[in-house]
Structure formats: structure tokens, C-alpha cells
């Protein structure tokens, strides 16, 4: 995951440093071209069912633009094959905006954050877990019960550090945040393995956890990780544009600032566990 996926998610990776200055894209042709993953619910899919799809649709509507997509799996090479790639035999880029990248993402210029969430622990609604109100409560289970648990984690996520700190790493069942299978999606750990008993608890980026818990018909529930010293579980998500396109970045940034309540409403409808956004620092030219 990004460091967040976790981010999943964690989000798109490309190769090489930022390109030289590029012409600004101010939507002069009236098209909002979005780079997205075709199978990454609840973020996005080809049917337009993810919360990133809904945010893009709202933005396009407010701009009076037509909405178009370039789809590519959000894994190694995503930025290179979408935001930085041109339509063959033209000077037009395939897409101009990534709806979800980590705040300060190095492969794109970034807007102000619009989403602040945290990792969560997801577990079945079983009697032995009835008293779990925070992830730390897992450690209060009887030792003989605790040592039998299979704990699903994504590699390179904060959950790895948490399991190490609590001497539970040997019970980890590891998942790749970016597998080579284009049909795989991060929520599979919850929707398949957790509900079928292949793992007893899963540690997942909050937006993914909330969506799939809501789809489980009350079979599983989640508890978010609160802030704690030494391990960062919360991350902010921004939008990404090409370096050098300041006017376009500012246009998107201003839209976010003016429409945060609309964005929050979309995120809440997907059961995303939201934290307050951090106070904005002055945005540097990118």
C-alpha cells in the first residue's frame, strides 16, 4: 500500500524523477481526464462505482466538463503509463488527474489533502471478540487463545510494526498490496479470507475496511487505530497532477477547498472512517 497502501492501496508508483516543466492544463477543451484503477473498490472501478469515481464525477459536473478515464492497475508503473503517458501520435496526455495519492507524493505535484483516515483492525462478530473496542484490546485475550489467531496484514504497512511490537509477527498471514493479478483487490482479505475463517483478524487501510465491513451483513466489525507513539497509522490523501502544471493544480486545489463538505458526504456514504484534516500549510510551487 502506499506507505498507506495501504495505502494500499498504497498507491500508484511509476519510474523516474519529475519531468521538466510542462504546459498548464486548465481544461480548455472541457474534458476532465482522470487516471484510475479499473478494479480497486471502494476507490474506483470501470463501472464508476468507487468513491474516487463519485468525487471525479462531482468535480466534472461543477466544472461543466465531460468526464473521461484512462484505466490502468494501480501498481508499479501506474503514473508512467497514465499521467505521464501521451496518446500515440499526439502531444495530448492520456489523463490529467489522479484522484487519490498520498500527501506530498513524490511522483506528482499534489493538491491540498481531502481525506484523512487511519488503519483499522477488522474481525468477525464472534463471542470471544465481544470486548474488543480498540486494537490494543486484542492483547487482553487469554494467552492460549491469542497465540492461535491468524492475523492478516499487508506487507510494508504499519500493521507489521504493530505486530512486531506486540510479539505477534509469527502469527501474521502476509498479503501483497500490489499483486501481479489485475483481478485482485485489497478488500479480498476481508470479503473472502476473513469471512471464511482463513484469518481471524485483518489489519487494513480504513477506507477499504469500512466499505467491506459495511458489505458483510454484520459478519465483521472494525476498530480504528488511535494515534500512538512510534507507529503512524493515519495518512492524508491528496490529488495528483503533473509537475509544472500550476494553474491546473490550483484549479483542482480551489475546487477541493470549496467543496470539502460534498467530498466528506461521498466518503461517509462509503463508510470511510474520517479524521479531521490537518491545518493547511502554504502550498509551494510544483
Image (cartoon, rainbow, N blue to C red):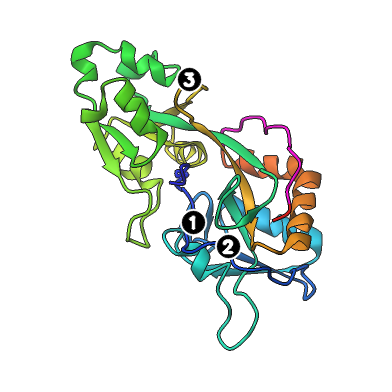
Which residue position is annotated with label 3?
229
Q: Circle 1 sits in a helix, a strand or a loop, which is it?
A: loop
Q: Residue at x 54, y 69 (%)?
A: 82
Main SS of the magenta part reads loop
Which region of the structure is painted magenta?
272-284
Earlier in the chain: of badge 3 and badge 2, it is 2
* Residue 230 in the image, given as x and y percentages of width and height: 45, 23
Vertical relation: 204 (above or below) 107: above
Q: Is residue 195 visible?
A: no
Q: Residue at x 61, y 55 (%)?
A: 99
Which residue position is annotated with label 1?
12
Q: Is residue 165 visible?
A: yes
> Viewer-nearest of labels 1 and 3?
3
* Residue 188 in the image, given as x and y percentages of width and height: 36, 47
Of 233 and 263, which appears nearest the observer? 233
Mark-to-mark CA distance, 2 and 1: 15 Å
Earlier in the chain: of badge 1 and badge 3, it is 1
Q: Circle 2 sits in a helix, a strand or a loop, which is it?
A: loop
Q: Is residue 195 toward the left or the right of residue 276 in the image?
A: left
Of 279 and 31, which appears nearest the observer? 279
* Label drawn at residue 103: none
Earlier in the chain: of badge 2 and badge 1, it is 1
* Label drawn at residue 18: 2
Amino acid at each position: 500500500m502506499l506507505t498507506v497502501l495501504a495505502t494500499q492501496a498504497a498507491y500508484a508508483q511509476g519510474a523516474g524523477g519529475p519531468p521538466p516543466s510542462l504546459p498548464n492544463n486548465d481544461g480548455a477543451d472541457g474534458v476532465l481526464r482522470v487516471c484510475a484503477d479499473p478494479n480497486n473498490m471502494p476507490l474506483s472501478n470501470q463501472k464508476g462505482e468507487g468513491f474516487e469515481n463519485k468525487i471525479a464525477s462531482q468535480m466534472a459536473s461543477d466544472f461543466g466538463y465531460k468526464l473521461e478515464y484512462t484505466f490502468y492497475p494501480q501498481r508499479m508503473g501506474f503514473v508512467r503509463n497514465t499521467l505521464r503517458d501521451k496518446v500515440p501520435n499526439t502531444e495530448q496526455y492520456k489523463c490529467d488527474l489522479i484522484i487519490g495519492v498520498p500527501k506530498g507524493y513524490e511522483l506528482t505535484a499534489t493538491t491540498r489533502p481531502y481525506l484523512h483516515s487511519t488503519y483499522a483492525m477488522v474481525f468477525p462478530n464472534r463471542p470471544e471478540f465481544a470486548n474488543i473496542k480498540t486494537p490494543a484490546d486484542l492483547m487482553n485475550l487469554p494467552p492460549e487463545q491469542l497465540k492461535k489467531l491468524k492475523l492478516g496484514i499487508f506487507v510494508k504497512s504499519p500493521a507489521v510494526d504493530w505486530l512486531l511490537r506486540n510479539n505477534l509477527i509469527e502469527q501474521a498471514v502476509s498479503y501483497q498490496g500490489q499483486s501481479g493479478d489485475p483481478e485482485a483487490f485489497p478488500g479480498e482479505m476481508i470479503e473472502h479470507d476473513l469471512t471464511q475463517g482463513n484469518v481471524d483478524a485483518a489489519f487494513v487501510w480504513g477506507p477499504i475496511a469500512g466499505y467491506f465491513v459495511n458489505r458483510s451483513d454484520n459478519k465483521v466489525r472494525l476498530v480504528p487505530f488511535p494515534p500512538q507513539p512510534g507507529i503512524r497509522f493515519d495518512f492524508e490523501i491528496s490529488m495528483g497532477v503533473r509537475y509544472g502544471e500550476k494553474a491546473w493544480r490550483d484549479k483542482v486545489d480551489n475546487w477541493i477547498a470549496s467543496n470539502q463538505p460534498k467530498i466528506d458526504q461521498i466518503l461517509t456514504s462509503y463508510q470511510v472512517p474520517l479524521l479531521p484534516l490537518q491545518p493547511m500549510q502554504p502550498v509551494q510551487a510544483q
